[in-house]
Image (tube, rainbow, N blue to C red):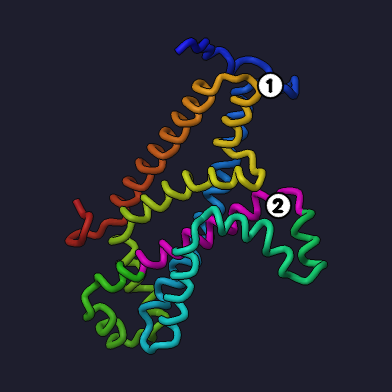
Amino acid sequence: MNYHWNWRIFGELSPDGVHTYWDTLMSGLAWTLATSLGGWVMALVLGFAVGALRTLPGRVLPLLGTGYVEVFRNVPLLVQMFLWFFVAPELLPQAAGDWLKTLPNAPFVTAVVCLGFFTSARVAVQVTAGIQALAGGQRLAALALGLDLPQTYRFVLLPLAVRIILPPLTSEFLNIIKNSSVALTIGLMELTASARAIQEFSFQVFEAFSAATLIYVLANLVVIAAMRVLERRLALPGTLGAR
């Protein structure tokens, strides 16, 4: 293959005449991290709420939680991204729809919301599994001590469950970073879109995507290291993960 490698491309000016191609990649990384972190916070809040809902006594609330999970877990992320960006504004009242369309960072807001809902369904399943993995006596003991049901979840079940599900939560955090690349389809200039722009302007396709790949790997390694530290800090003596 007659390909001219040029790793110095990242020090050259991009077409805007102000920033280098390396600045373009760093800007893409910033959007990737902002989108991922925003979606992750939303996913945790919704995921823990829905996951706990699915373990409550009765039939109606667990059924609602299961319906939420099945809707957002079984529709492809790309389809959801298009629905939130192109369809949702048209379903709202005209004033609200026009407001959404004119948001200065509409692709970013859409990506955060879409990733948040999509990932929250997966987090909810893990939270449910974590609560169900606890011995049934945990709930009964808390209730016997005088705690009501919300307090039982807040002070006993969820703190113990989160220690069990930290490893799969780490995987979901890594997934949301990688899934943020789907946002390029609605115009968000995240890391993958930035690499694609560099490739289109410079024709150095291997350099652009090799650099993006390396940045993804490094970002994910940082997340893994941070989550391992968190696992050790949260581990209780005599429980899973304690050393």
Please, what is the three-letter code of the amino acid marked with disc 1?
Ser
Task: Kindly state the secondary structure of the residue where label 1 is placed.
Answer: loop
Is residue 138 magenta-colored?
no
Q: Residues within 10 Å of mark 2 (few under 14, many from 20)?
A: some
Residue located beneath label 2 in the image = 106
Report whether 240 appears left or right of 4: left
Q: Which residues lie in the magenta part?
A: 103-127
Residues 237 and 221: in front is 221
Task: Kindly state the secondary structure of the residue where label 2 is placed.
Answer: helix
Report whether 139 appears left or right of 74: left
Please, what is the three-letter code of the amino acid marked with disc 2?
Ala
Residue depicted at x 64% and y 55% = 110
Residue depicted at x 24% and y 60% = 236
Residue depicted at x 67% and y 49% = 107
Is residue 111 magenta-colored?
yes
Q: Is residue 81 above or below residue 132?
A: above
Residue 34: x and y in percent read: 58, 45
Q: Is residue 140 above or below residue 122?
A: below
Residue 233: x and y in percent read: 31, 52
Q: Which mark is residue 14?
A: 1
Q: Is residue 181 visible?
A: yes
Residues 234 and 116: in front is 116
Residue depicted at x 44% and y 29% = 214
Residue 77: x and y in percent read: 51, 55
Disc 2/disc 1 C-alpha distance (Å) = 25 Å
